Image: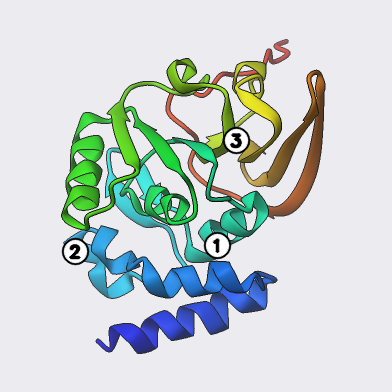
Amino acid sequence: MNLEKARFNMVEQQIRTWEVLDQDVLDLLFVVKREEFVPLAYRQLAFADIEIPLGHGACMFAPKIEAHALQALHVKKHDKVLEIGTGSGYMAALLAAHAAQVWSIEIVPELSKTAHATIKRLGINNITVETGDAAKGWKSQAPYDVIMVSGSLPMLPTEIQAQLKVGGRMFVITGDAPVMNAQLVTRTAEDVYQCTNLFETQVPALVNAPQPERFTF
């Protein structure tokens, strides 16, 4: 497998054609090697337009969703970032490339351990991987400039929104299958949040995602 050709095709055929045109994002996808984070059994599919299973019910997002999230969040060098759901550690590595510090929280200890080992092996020093349940955020380092939710939520918990700084941005996928909305939430003032729908998709739910009250008959 020609990794560089496969990477080039991923960027040009999947990502650029899906309205990800930020050159900084496209360049970053050549720098942070996606295949380093993919389980060995799926290495040949590292650049395919699919979710890659990680075990424990978790998966890596399709590359175009990862790229769209990066473009929307527009991470800056001074930003404090929270990622909810570490998975393989790849999204944390992408965020860390442009951020001051990333705290990435994973509820599955085995995934947390593997991601931490990969990040350490690659010499990335501005990511802290912790094992825990961040379905309602991670208050210990709040507030954050950026929050990335790497899993879907049936609704957006106010507890997570409250952990954004004013001016902070959050990428989150909300709703129930088969139609979910990827959204950019921006805290524009102390009690004001602006929500922009980016695209429709469907991804696995975050473990312990807060549930809305549902009518029963």
**Residue lying at 16% horizontally and 54% vertically, measured from the top left:** 121
Q: In the image, which disc is placed on residue 145?
A: 3
**Would you call the spot at circle 3 few (<14 residues within 10 Å), some (14-19), or many (20 or more)?**
many
Label whose residue precedes the other's in the sequence (2 or 3) = 2
Residue at mark 1: 67
To which residue does mark 2 refer?
41
Callout 2 amino acid:
Ala
Q: Which secondary structure lies at badge 2?
A: helix
Which amino acid, by three-letter code, is at mark 1? Ala
- Relative to residue 8, is residue 139 depicted above or below? above
Which is nearer the eye, 3 or 123?
123
* CA separation in Å, label 2 and label 1: 23 Å
Asked whether residue 48 is in view, the answer is no
Quadrant containing the C terminus is top right
On screen, residue 75 versus residue 156, left or right, reads: left
| Secondary-structure class at tag 3 | strand
Image-quadrant location for residue 97: bottom left
Q: Earlier in the sequence, mark 2 or mark 1?
A: 2
User: Which of labels 2 and 1 is toward the front?
Assistant: 1
Alpha carbon of mark 1 to alpha carbon of mark 3: how far? 19 Å
Residue 73 can be seen, yes or no: yes
Quadrant of res 126:
top left
Measuring 44% from the left and 84% from the top, which residue is drawn there? 8
How busy is the neighbourhood of tag 2: few (under 14 within 10 Å), some, or many (20 plus)?
few
Circles 2 and 1 in contact, beta carbons < 8 Å: no
Q: Between residue 74 and residue 12, name the one nearer to us.
A: 74
Q: Which x, y percent locates residue 43?
A: 24, 69
Q: Nearer the viewer, residue 197 or 192?
A: 192
> Could you tell which of marks 1 and 3 lies nearer the N-terminus?
1
Residue 192 is left or right of residue 4, and the answer is: right
